[in-house]
Amino acid sequence: MKQLIANLKALGPVKLGAMGAVAVAVLGLMAALVLTGGPSPSATLYSGLGLKDAGQITATLKAAHIPYSIGEGGHSVLVTPAQLDEARLLLAQHNLPAGSSDGFAIFDHKNPLLGSSFLNRIDETRALDSELERTIDLIHGVSASRVQVVLPRRDEFSLSTAPAQASVMLSLAGAAPLDHESVDAILNLVASAVPGLKPTNISIVDNRGDLLAQAGRTDDSLLNARDAALKRSTEHQLSDAVRSMLAAVVGPSAVRVVTAVSMDFDRSDQTSTTYDPNGQVVRSQEQTRSKSARSNGANKTVSVSNNLPGAQPKSSSPTRLDTQSKSTQTTNYEISQSVKHIVHATPQITRISVAVMLDEVPSKGPKGQVVWKPRTAAQITQIRDLVKTAIGYNKSRGDVVDVQSLQFAPNQLPAMHAPSLLDRFLSSGLLMPLLRMLLAAGVAIAALLVVFKPMVRRILEPVVAAIEPPSTANGEQTAAIAGPASVDETNPVKVIADLIERHPDASVAVLRDWIGQEPVQ
């Protein structure tokens, strides 16, 4: 070691500096291979962008010297995780992404007095479409939307006004369809934003071609869809209630529950009046009495003699008097009555049917095998009573609860084994970084062998030449070491000890050579 240090010092500062520079270069190459040997991790800045928005975002990032990458055919922009927040704040300052259009912001730089009424109406429609698209895009499950609104208008010389209409195109975010609640929300949202627009005049289609809401439908069709959704929701609620209750007793994997609910969705308005004849009460009474009299006089004969002047009238017969009396009585009775007004506005449950299937109980047989035993009748009865209580059983309504104990089919899925250490290592994503590090280490070792090996050889050549004795064919190597030209003949032991101390490796080699020689005959 001392000899190596001495030889390094003998090289001088120039050669040592060159060796240090080569070492630093090799280490830098290793670091570069490790750090840049693979793609840098990236985080999604925005996805599902339009090409116009993607172009504006990339231009803004390029101007800010923020590295980015593009994915999904130009519809997503990715940056490094360290610059994700900075990029979002920068884009927010520039109002990006702006969406497919500018909404009512298109009127910020326009003078409505310079355009015609037709152009102003078109701009208003475009702005309304854009604002509705921005709002619908915020609904969960919707990635993008397109809205076309036809505002109500009346043509010249026309007495009727065309109704407002709208069509909505939805791009769903996942594979699941949009639920009825979200569809109803979009219908009411668009109808409330457009004056005179009814939900029945709105059509909604998704990107799979499914018709979610049809224009021209009646209110009855909307009610039918809501009634079906209410029926399914009621069945799921009852099934979940029974399943969660029985899972605590038999286990979650040993019970299956199916519920069917019959509901009456008729909306009726009924009014009935009932009279009680036994509850008569005199309300009013009216009595009228009348009496009349009429007299009958003598009959006077009309003749010429009776009408002559100075003639005496003939005497008449005596007068007869007629009398008449009348009495009338009217009595009004109040009969008690009851008026009943019944309005059936909410659906009524007419029948509930619940089927419960329980797995049999496993037990060990006499030979250690698994034997399945059905549940006892007492257990079935207890479970049936629990189910009746949970669903609100009503016998007069015709409810049915059936509980059966059957053996479930064995699970046909392949057994899931725990992943091995190799599988976990391959799925962890550490394989490629490790390979890059090994490659960098191999390159570094090769560089060391190529660059440093000649230098070390040049350093050690003088040492080896100094300690190697001249070899002859007759094996006169010992004479070269202890020859009279280089040692003091008066004390050869001291000379040999000094040589062995200074050159231990060479001395060991000489001894090995001696031991390996054949004895001289």
Image: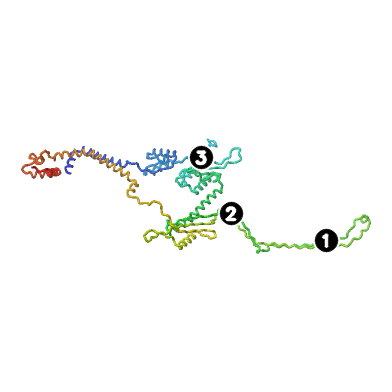
**Who's the residue at 53% across and 57% down the image?**
351
Q: Looking at the rendering, in which quadrant would you find the N terminus?
A: top left
Find residue 176 and report its horizontal and vertical position in percent.
Answer: 46, 47
The residues bearing labels 3 and 2 have C-alpha atoms spaced at a distance of 45 Å
Q: Nearer the viewer, mark 3 or mark 2?
A: 2
Element on which disc 3 rests:
helix
Determine which of the numbered discs, if any, sits on residue 268 in the image.
2
Q: Amino acid at mark 3?
A: Arg
Q: Looking at the rendering, in which quadrant would you find the C terminus?
A: top left
**Residue 196 vs residue 26, the one in the foreground:** 26
Disc 3 vs disc 2: Cβ atoms closer than 8 Å? Answer: no
**Residue 260 vs residue 376, the one in the foreground:** 376
Q: Around disc 2, counting alpha carbons within 10 Å, would you say few (fewer than 14), some (14 to 19), or many (20 or more)? A: few
Which of the two labelled residues, at mark 3 and mark 2, occupies the earlier sequence position?
3
Which of the two labelled residues, at mark 3 and mark 1, occupies the earlier sequence position?
3
Query: Does residue 95 appear in this view?
Result: no
Q: Amino acid at mark 2?
A: Ser
Find residue 132 and report its horizontal and vertical position in percent.
Answer: 50, 43
Determine which of the numbered discs, if any, sits on residue 294 in the image.
1
Furthest residue toward left: 490
The residue under label 3 is: 126
Q: Amino acid at mark 1?
A: Arg
Q: Is residue 317 left or right of residue 202?
A: right
Query: Does residue 214 appear in this view?
Result: yes
Element on which disc 1 rests:
strand
Which picture quadrant has residue 450? top left
Which of the two labelled residues, at mark 2 and mark 1, occupies the earlier sequence position?
2
The residues bearing labels 2 and 1 have C-alpha atoms spaced at a distance of 67 Å
Q: Around disc 3, counting alpha carbons within 10 Å, would you say few (fewer than 14), some (14 to 19), or many (20 or more)? A: many
